Amino acid sequence: MAVDERFPQDPRDVAEEAEAGVRNEIITGPVSDWATDFSHLEPEWSADPYPIQDDLRQRCPIAHTERFGGAWLPTRYKDVSAIAYDTERFSSRQIIVSNFRSPRDIAPVGEAPPISSDPPFHHDARKLLLGGFTKKEVAKQEPATRAFCHALVDELAGRDVVDAARDYAQHIPVRVIANMLGFPEEDGPQFRVFVEDVLEGINRQPEERQEAFARLDAYLLAQVHDHLDNPRDDLTSFLIDAELYGSKLPPNVVTGAMALLLIAGIDTTWSAIGSSLWHLAKTPADRERLVAEPGLLPTAMEEFLRVYAPVTMARLVRDDMHWRGVDMKADDWILLSFPAANRDPAQFDRPGEVVIDREVNRHAAFGLGIHRCLGSHLARMELRVALEVWLERVPSFTLDNPAAVTWSSGQIRGPRSLPLRIG
Amino acid sequence: MKVQINPELCQGHGRCYDLAPGLFGADDEGYGQVLGDGTVPPGAGHDAELAAANCPEQAVELLEEG
């Protein structure tokens, strides 16, 4: 067995280190007023957050909640972009709103670099990964992705009603990222549990959350050991061997980056594919036009990304300050809603309408500034191929039962059940 | 007309080289690069305008010559 002293054999040796930090009381239940008590984890938000965001943008553009130990929700494009660009006053130390603040000294690296990193470390960690995610590099994954999409559609043969979220969309990013990280394809179902634990289990009890994170850490450590024993040409071996500042990466940077690539690549793309198919299922004119004009898909796809942007990020306020009319406290969360920014009438004409041939579309679905989604080129490739194959093979489809569509909860939004009547 | 990219603003979204591949390319890290000296040939003006109008970081600039 290959030995690398950075990585212990027993995952418990890693898990015991964590757990400094501050917890707050967990508050759940119906929202009294979205301006003063918002919660992105309540069912009303999951079902349809856009009317809530539109209302807040008019009457209270930077909403607040005492939940999560204190958080703010800006809904104007100009505020969301200002925060994304201001890495001095808004830290990325944690990017998922929860009931736990990790210690301030985990900055500038954070738990899942580089998404959780601040300057100056951020730049160097991100630079390591950029080359693996360029448009040219991810194009190498396209033939296998297309073949896999076809295989998924083959499986649907003979059925009148299929679940496009469960039977199609979710499998695509799972398979792509498993291949890129060099994890076993058959572990896909486990990845989905990890994703739910990290992104949706926000209001679970601390012990339950810790156990979930320990399971993820143990899995990643096992993959590291497998790659130490059998190095290969994939992102895991790349991270194990990579050097920064003249030495190999610290173990928490290796496994933190692996966690990021695994978690961030799955839910997000699954959501984007699912939301696009949901829209087309309930909008026959758009579906028919895209079937007839496949060349319009890249433009339409950008509109789906704008209007159904799947990803909301978070920041932590660095120090107490008065900011654009509100009094922010150190370690208040900012729920950084790119979806809300993308529907701001000050930035977009007809923001609530889906205009599939919208030519000018300066949307922020992949973020703005130094944290621009590292995987955006991969996500766009997967979304395009998934929609191309679906529209080619299943040109006619409608919602089987609109009430049966369910949506994810938390910062990543997309359909989790999407029953479609096909053929 | 010429195009240029402000490297201080570019974050590698790649909208310019998606929309106007005749005018822009990518470097090894995915940041946008102007091809040649950035002169927009006849017929490519619309592509140049699309690239500028869709850059999320407003890093693509159009320069009128003359």
Image: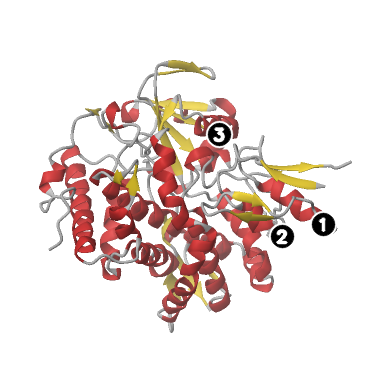
Q: Local crowd at mark 3 within 10 Å, few (<14), some, or many (≥20)? A: many
Q: Nearer the viewer, mark 3 or mark 1?
A: 1
Q: Residue at 49% of width from left, 70% of height from top?
A: A142
Image coordinates of residue A248 in percent, x first then y, are 28, 47
Residue behind mark 3: A81
Residue B30 appears anywhere in the view: yes
Please say if A187 is above or below A104: below
Marks 2 and 1, the one that precedes in the sequence: 2
| C-alpha distance separating marks 3 and 1 | 34 Å
Question: Considering the numbered disc 1 on the image, is that residue within a helix, a strand or a loop?
Answer: loop
The image quadrant where one finds the N terminus of chain A is bottom left
Residue B60 occupies which quadrant of the picture? top right
Is B24 left or right of A406, judged from the image as shown?
right
| C-alpha distance separating marks 2 and 3 | 30 Å
Residue behind mark 2: B22
Please say if A73 is above or below B1: above
Residue A32 occupies which quadrant of the picture? top left
Question: Considering the numbered disc 2 on the image, is that residue within a helix, a strand or a loop?
Answer: loop
Is A266 left or right of A304, judged from the image as shown?
left
Per the rendering, the mark at residue B41 is 1
Residue sitting nearer the eye, A200 or A400: A200
Q: Residue at 19% of width from left, 30% of height from top?
A: A20
Residue sitting nearer the eye, A408 or A153: A153
Question: Considering the numbered disc 3 on the image, is that residue within a helix, a strand or a loop?
Answer: helix
Image coordinates of residue A401 in percent, x first then y, are 47, 64
Image coordinates of residue B39 in percent, x first then y, are 79, 51
**Disc 2 to disc 3: CB gap under 8 Å:** no
Residue type highlighted by circle 2? Gly
Chain assignment, label 1 = B
